[in-house]
Amino acid sequence: MTRRQKAIAFFVALCVLLVTAAISLNIGWIVINARRVTPLILGIISFALIIAGLIVYTVFLVLEIKRNEDHDTFINAVTHELKTPIASMRLYLQTLQSREVDEARRREFYDIMLEDADRLHRTVEQVLKAGASGQKAKIVARAPVDMAALTTECVRLALTRHHLAAAAITLEAHPAASDGHLVVNGDAEELRTVVTNLLDNAIKYSGTAVNVTVSVAAPAPDTVWVRVQDKGVGIPRKQLKRIFNRFYRVQARGLKQVTGTGLGLYIVRSIARSHGGRVFAQSEGEGRGATFTLELPRLAS
């Protein structure tokens, strides 16, 4: 049990003890003043307010402790995500500076440093987008966005970024997707962030055997779906409603530590809502993979 968990258990136990004492005093007051109506009513009201105050205070205190724990987890994750690529780039730069390296090796070092720079850039972007989402920033520029084309672009980028074979991600265009009318009204950059985060999430939680299926479809005349399905570690059913919370990480047995800031799905939900849509997750449980569906209003053709 961690220090914060002990603190939470202490305050919950203290609240129960105080509420029990207050109830005992209340019962004693009722017995003593059973024949005196005014003191009896005032006493009951006063004790009820005291009990309510104790419960509210304890709940608030526990939530604050949990929020501080989430912030600490986030800071540790961001620190790791920032330090790791910086340390890697520093190492390769020191190597290039201190010794002679042939051209092939030099180009390899440059490629690795560029990947580290991209990772650093993505981390900073996620933190900034999470801050903007928390402030409920409005989308300034909206325009028609072809979700089939955008998803195809995101799949190609994910294959390159994660060094995957083309067969690792299957892109399905359902019959309705081939008419070129899977269009929504929105911000292309924001929607690209949503699909990219869903793909990155599916790949990271797939382990070494990445097998992801992405489909774009119109399940209804006024709706566009982008669905990302993996065959990875899955999500315990009790956690399905919490995975879109800020800083939350899936906790599953046998799951190795996955790098990241814990902001990806929170950003996905915020952007989906700002576009008048929603995102939801489905999973049969641990070891059975997960399916994330982005649902957006379809722009009339």
Image (cartoon, rainbow, N blue to C red):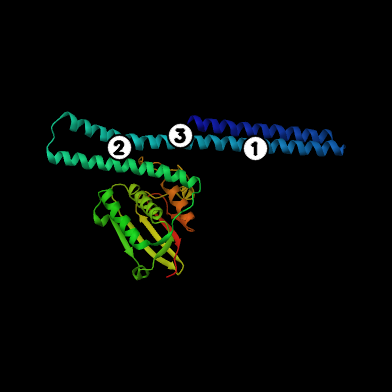
**Residue under numbered circle 1:** 55
Task: Looking at the image, tell me whether mark 2 or mark 3 is earlier in sequence order.
Answer: 3
Looking at the image, do the residues carrying marks 1 and 3 touch, with CB atoms under 8 Å apart?
no
Q: Answer with mark 1 or mark 2, whichever residue precedes in sequence.
A: 1
Q: Residue at x 43, y 37 (%)?
A: 74
Q: Residue furthest right?
A: 35
- Residue beneath the point at 46% across and 67% down: 222
Q: In the image, residue 197 lies at what x, y percent? A: 38, 50
Q: Height in image: 43 above or below 274?
A: above
Residue 72 got which mark? 3
Q: Earlier in the sequence, mark 1 or mark 3?
A: 1
Question: Residue 85: in sight, yes or no?
Answer: yes
Residue 213: mark in rendering: none
Query: In screen coordinates, is 138 left or right of 162?
Result: right
Is 242 situated above or below 19?
Answer: below
Task: From the viewer's side, name the closer residue of 177 and 287.
Answer: 177
User: In the rendered picture of this protein, how many numbered marks are placed on residues?
Assistant: 3
Query: Residue 253: image x %, image y %?
Result: 39, 43
What is the three-letter code of the residue carrying label 3? Answer: Asp
Q: Residues under labels 1 and 3: Cα distance?
A: 26 Å
Marks 2 and 3 close (CB-CB < 8 Å): no
Write the residue at 87% across / 37% down. 36
| Amino acid at circle 1 | Ile
Left or right: 4 in relation to 75: right
Where disc 2 sits, the SS reads helix
Q: Is residue 251 visible?
A: no
Quadrant in which the C terminus is drawn: bottom left
Residue farthest along the front direction in this orientation: 141
Res 188 → quadrant: bottom left
Can you identify the residue that label 2 sits on? 85
Do labels 1 and 2 touch, CB within 8 Å?
A: no
